[in-house]
Amino acid sequence: MSILVTRPHPDNEASAASLRARGHVVLLAPVLKFEPVAFHDESETSYDGIIVTSANAIRAVAPQLPGLGLLHLPLFAVGEHTAIAARDAGFAEVIVAGGDAAALRDKVVQSARDKVLKKRSTLLYLAGADLSRDLGAELSAEGFNVVTQTTYRMAPVKLLPREVCEGFASHGIEAVLHYSRRSARAFLEAARDEGVEISALAIPQCCLSETVAGVLREAGASQVLVAATPDENALFDTLERALRTRLA
């Protein structure tokens, strides 16, 4: 029996390695494909900090960073995974939030109160093309000037790998891991197009957050579990709980 990981490449490889270390057989079905968007900042704006909600935003601009004059700025990362990407790219001051956009907003606001940022700071938001919430507007309401620059997009993958379709058809997949709302939707669309949607939704769907879980519930999944906190270790704990329940 296999665990299906829908996370995009290359992060799915690290997830698979962690799952295999826990004794699981893993199938990969990256249902979103990373596509960088050319970064052009011709405004000559002087930034006081950077906010990032995905490691992909860092990956997209990493080759340009040495020439952009941004590496000296404090960078606010949504979680530890994004923080690691930022440090690897050369940022020295990385401040880590609690794993979702709301926690990142609160971390930025608190940093202004703690005088890590000055009042009415100008922040550069390195963002994806599709945003689950308007973080820039939320921070603007708190008195910040936010400049949003789209650095990447995640394009849906239309087809599931053949071994994944065969796994659903033979009931050889025992749970699916979902990391974002967009990837959950892309997974559902691909499963529907492949004719395996009923089998796919009949097994536990382990979700990184309640926002992700809502997509699966709306589609009719009856076994939807949500990680206690929006990080992968908590997601893996949720998976183990789901598997124990199925064996009980």
Image (cartoon, rainbow, N blue to C red):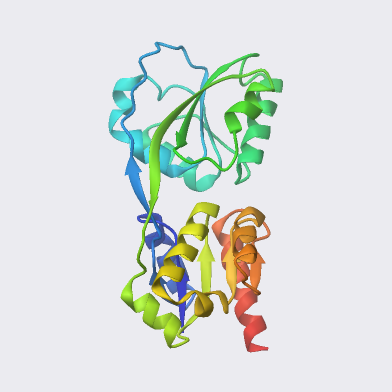
Above-or-below relation of 104 to 201: above
Residue 25 percent location from the top left of the image: 42, 78
187 or 121: which is nearer to us?
187
Residue 172 against residue 50 in the figure, above or below: below
Q: Is residue 205 above or below residue 172?
A: above
Residue drawn at x 63%, y 53% is 211
179 relative to 120 in the view: left or right: left
Quadrant of the image occupied by residue 98: top right
Viewer-side residue, 79 vs 136 = 136
**Is 245 left or right of 27, judged from the image as shown?**
right
Q: Can you say which quadrant of the picture contains the C terminus?
A: bottom right
Q: Position of residue 238 (x, y in %)?
A: 63, 68
Q: Residue at x 53, y 62 (%)?
A: 178
Residue 56's spot in the image, x, y percent? Answer: 41, 43
Question: Which residue occupies 58% across, 70% down?
Answer: 205
The residue under the point 45% across, 30% down is 92
Vertically, is 160 above or below 61? below
